[in-house]
Image: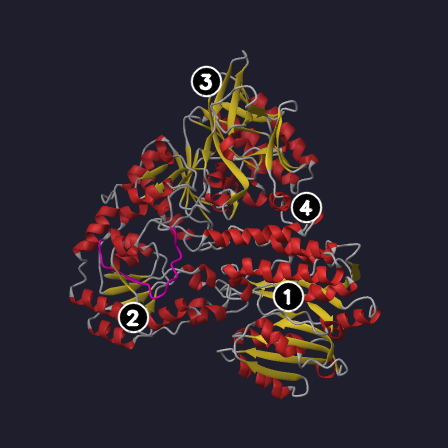
Amino acid sequence: MDDNDNSFIFSIVMAIYNTQEYLKEAIDSIIYQSLDFKENTQLVLVNDGSEDDSLDIALEYQKKFPNNIVVLSQENQGQASARNNGLDYVKGKYVNFFDSDDKLSETTLEEVNNFFKLHEESIDVVTVKIIEFERSTKAHPLNFRFKCDRVIDLVKEPGNPQLSVSSSFIKNSAINNQRFKTNLVGSEDTNFINRILLEKKAYGVLENPTYYYRKRMDNSSSVDSYIDMVGFYTDRLKYHFMDLIQYCLDKEGEVPEFIKYTLAYNIQWMVTPEVPNFDYKYQADVFMQYFKKVLSYLSIDALNSKLIRGPALRNYLISKYNDDIHCDFDLKRHDVFIRSKNRQLDRLGAHQFWIDIVELKDNHLNISGALNSLFDSDHISIKAVRKDKNGNTFIYGAKKVDYTARSNLLFLSETIQYKYNFDLSVPLDEDIEYEIGIKVMYYKNGNTLDFKKGNVVTKFLSIGFRRHSPISKYCNYFVKDSKIVYFEDNKFYVENYKYSKMISHEKNTLKTIKEANIPNFMNILWIRGLALLLYPIFKYKNRNKKTYLFMDRVDKADDNAEHLFRYALNQNDNINKYYIISEDCSDYSRVNKELKNVVKFASLKHKLLFLFADKVISSNPDDGVVNPFVVEGKTLVYSNSSEIPKYYIRHGVTQGNMSTWLKKYDKNISLLLTSSSLERDSFFDAGYGYDKDRIQVLGLPRFDNLRNDNVKKQILIIPTWRNYLVGSKDIFLKSPYFNSLNELLNDDDLIDFVEKQGYEIVLKPHPNLERTIKNTNERFIDLFDIHDKIRVSNEGDYQKLFRESAIMITDFSSVFFDFGYLKKPIIYYQPNDDHPFKGGYFDYNTMGFGEVTKNLLDLKSKIKYYIESDCKIEQIYEDRINNFFDNIDRNNCKRVYDWIDSH
């Protein structure tokens, strides 16, 4: 680096490692800036031992711009080393360190140059905002700084940390002898730029220019991979945090406040449940020693600032800074406190109960919710207090519930925040009206059976409602059966139904909605008014005639709901039954022609039926699928009829753990249908939250119609999908998924053998393969080079394919359960370690309905075996099928319908 040779305004140093698919876009975003490239910009491309075509791409650009582009090449030594190497060649007045898979907005360099001209003496650094693209489109958390073009004085405004050099432009002269630290993993940017910021303690920010940071679809960028490395943690504390602290102490005799804020912001990202397990306890101890040591140089103001994400994390960092956290029992104030030294971190009475579910079921008021706090759950109990008008009081304890998706926040072995999820069930007697409150009890010694004075503090906390609840801040009541449940003055009230009472509650609700200026008020008023007017007719005149709604997907039929609906129509049981489907989907005309009582999704008829339905029976439990009002705001439109019981009769048999999606607190399913005791037992594991009586082994209704009729010499290939492949053509084409499947679909040896034996191969693509790729006109299926003797099936009738096929080949698709039900040969082709349903109970090697093959040669050998054996399934796999399914009697529809009708 020659300080005297600023022959360019900008020098862009770009470290490159295996980014051939992104490199051209990155370089072009520099070349085609509004500031003329040839006259003003030098590009230093440093190839860090790439094994792809990145170097060739760089050399091609150098040929086009020999006076502007320098290409260097080194053995793979890491990004820091590559940047340091490039620094020796820069000739620009301002230097930037660009990532080779990112891009820059068009006017960035011009605007940065103009800003430097205005503030040449006061700053050495100008930075621009960061926005993610590709896998994510989020703005960087520090983008709050870019509200206007200005100079930030870090002495006066220390809470404005700068971490990235890629989005920064630095005076060449200010870099001097500074170099990136090569012994760091992931923090070399922050260490480097803050050494420079220490000189003038100020930098410029620009409102409009943008640095676009690519979040790759395959999570292969360096930042994505750091989090799994132990070195990202302990070594960072030693070689970044403590190194920068020591640099400040040596240079200034103290750590400036802006550095404290920077390190506080930086260190919070290390507090994550994803910290890899240390091999030995001493390693975790060493980590925590350095963690506390770093914190000791920071400040309460920095650790308690808005830069730290959430109060739980702020409190944890402060407790480690003070090396103290304790519980104070204050009987005079009748409250409990969590303190760190003299600083209050939490107060029990300051919390709320957050309610997810309020339902009337089987003469009980069921209330489910959560309490989030710093207070140890083992010291807490939650109780409902029921009073009647005669003053009789009964107390009912809550059951604690574990949810995978709402569990305690942990860091290493410590709990940062406790999540107490609870279920309350309060019995209700006929015709008696009640008042019900909820209280929390904290036990000083942790013994929840010790009610001695001085050991217990009781608080009736305020109550709030989450979006899943039928009661909300806009609508405080619902009607169910012969009861009205309403919420007032922080208590629930249960009163006997009278239409006049319902009208009174509804008037208050509409007034609240109007005063809140909710959009589409007139539409809401019309829907709710019509529902109120019709309620006596639907619910009381016809109260002995129930209404059931059946539904698969909005745009798809031919699943368990349609099969069960066909059965239900033949039952003479005085129940109104309707099948719901969009008139825009391909199945609508068929279903409407073959069946009666087919209703168009989101039509007025559907909305009215939904408001007064007794049960919704669906193969998809998501509110966005079954609820026609979800786009209009569920709680505003139909909460006067409570949460309608939903019976989830499944899309298929479960293989993996789905507890992050299928949890009780936002689905509240009345039936979770299974086909096997093994499958059912997997839902009993912690994480889902359902009572055991709601999980039933009754069998999928569609299995009743599976037949081995008209079996052809047909081999069905039916792969499942990989969610990480969504959105990117390049990643899809390079994925093992594509390459192994494409190889199978082009194997001449297999196709010639099959053809000679009179067999045909049919490919049934997963629906996602038939979707259009983002920003293209191509579908994923179009990218395959499919042999012209393989037929691609576009028909929607899966059961027809199963009936006609003699052999199924799949990787992990759950349709193998359907095929196995028919006891026909299945071959699992799993050449890649990319199981999309990890964490489940089903083991392919010990439970699978066929052989697991790991390469194409073994797959072809097994296909040949079955063809030569007249496609007869082996006894071992037939036994596994018989042992897996509890019922293979084609009476699933009857069992499911009878259970739903009686529950």
Which amino acid lies under the numbered mark 1 shown in the image of this protein? Asp
Report the magenta residues as a range.
Answer: 823-839
The residue depicted at 44 percent of the width and 61 percent of the height is 768
Instruction: Find numbered disc 1 in the image and state the secondary structure of the residue it sits on.
Output: helix
Give the Cα distance between marks 2 and 3. 67 Å
Q: Relative to the observer, which residue lies in front, 171 or 369?
A: 171
Which amino acid lies under the numbered mark 2 shown in the image of this protein? Leu
* Foreground tag (2 vs 4): 4
Q: Which residue is mark 4?
A: 304
Residue 69 visible in the current orientation: yes
Q: Which residue is mark 1?
A: 189
Counting residues from the start of the chain, the first of labels 3 and 4 encountered is 4
Percent across and percent down for residue 893 are 30, 41
Give the Cα distance between marks 2 and 4. 58 Å
Looking at this view, name the residue that lies furthest to the top.
390
Give the Cα distance between marks 1 and 2. 46 Å
Instruction: Find numbered disc 4 in the image and state the secondary structure of the residue it sits on.
Output: loop
The answer to whether 874 is drawn above or below residue 639 in the figure is below
